[in-house]
Image: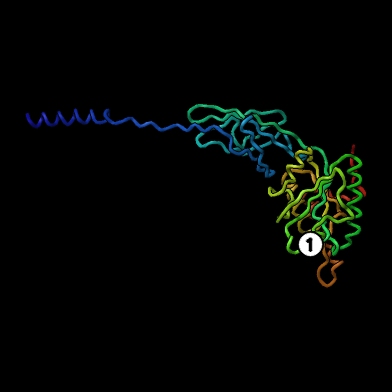
Amino acid sequence: MKRLKIISFLLVLALLIPSCKKEEHKEQKTGNSIIEFYVRSILLKAPIDEAQQAINLFLPADIDIKSVKPDITISEGATIDPPSFQIIDLSNPVEFTVTAEDGNQKVYTVYTEQLTDTAFMIIDVQNGWTMDCYKYEEVLDNINLIADNARAAGKPVVYVYDYSYPDNYNGWELQICDAISPQNGDFVLGKKNTVDVFDGTTKVIKKLNELGVGVVILSGISSGRCVDGSCIGSLDRGYKVIMASDCHTLKPAGFDGEVWAADQIITYNTKWANKGAAVVKAEEITFSQ
């Protein structure tokens, strides 16, 4: 009998213990923000205006605005609709709804502008490293031809200069060459330690967005470094690229330096054409009003 009472007591105790345990609730996350809106195909991260819950996306001329696949990072535990990596038509504003684990929602609107205007860009044509380049005087004349035509048509002329070497060059050497000096209304932007003026360390893309530019005509020094890097960089980011074939040069090297330099210019023009740039002589480049 005593044994039966003990067993009965243990059974009751076993039933009571679970009910005495404090019920554990998983705390639901409240985050419902878009942290990053990235168009990976053109290496473009769009700025997010959290106050307005707006994302302003600037797409260069060669991008199909009706077929964009954004890579979207959102708060931990949240979901988004439309989902990340889905192809979206951004020709009109599109709403993205982020829902937190606790059910609270936030709606972001993506506004997209297709950039179609044209800018002429002059890269690193500075006194310190231009005067020793192959046929540099002809190159400067050709650059001036395009720049004058661009200004006459009301198109922006954008100079990019390198200020990376103050210990190796004096002030005059770092200046843009006098023969192609900027005019009133031109834009002058500095860069440091980069061969691609379109990378995130420069203000070039921001300025081109402000100007509505999606087509770039490139020129500069030297063919094998910053001109090449900027051509590839602009193509990668979806710009329509026109390479002025006789508006870039480099320093001769080797036993027969001028022959080598001439061959290198042809080699780079061919490379850029194969990558998708239009390679055109200065005299053939025109601007519409």
Indicate whether 12 appears above or below 215. above
Q: Is residue 79 left or right of residue 46?
A: left
Quadrant of the rendering where the C terminus is positioned:
top right
Q: Tell me residue 200's x, y (percent).
A: 68, 47
Indicate whether 39 appears above or below 231. above
> Circle 1 sits on which residue?
170
Q: Tell me residue 46's x, y (percent).
A: 66, 38
- Residue at figure coordinates x 60%, y 36% from the top left: 84
Helix, strand or loop at label 1? It is loop
Quadrant of the rendering where the N terminus is positioned:
top left
Q: Tell me residue 7's x, y (percent).
A: 14, 31
Q: Nearer the viewer, residue 88 or 142?
A: 142
Q: Is residue 269 visible?
A: no
Q: Nearer the viewer, residue 243 or 195?
A: 195
Q: Tell me residue 207's x, y (percent).
A: 76, 42
Amino acid type, label 1 = Asn
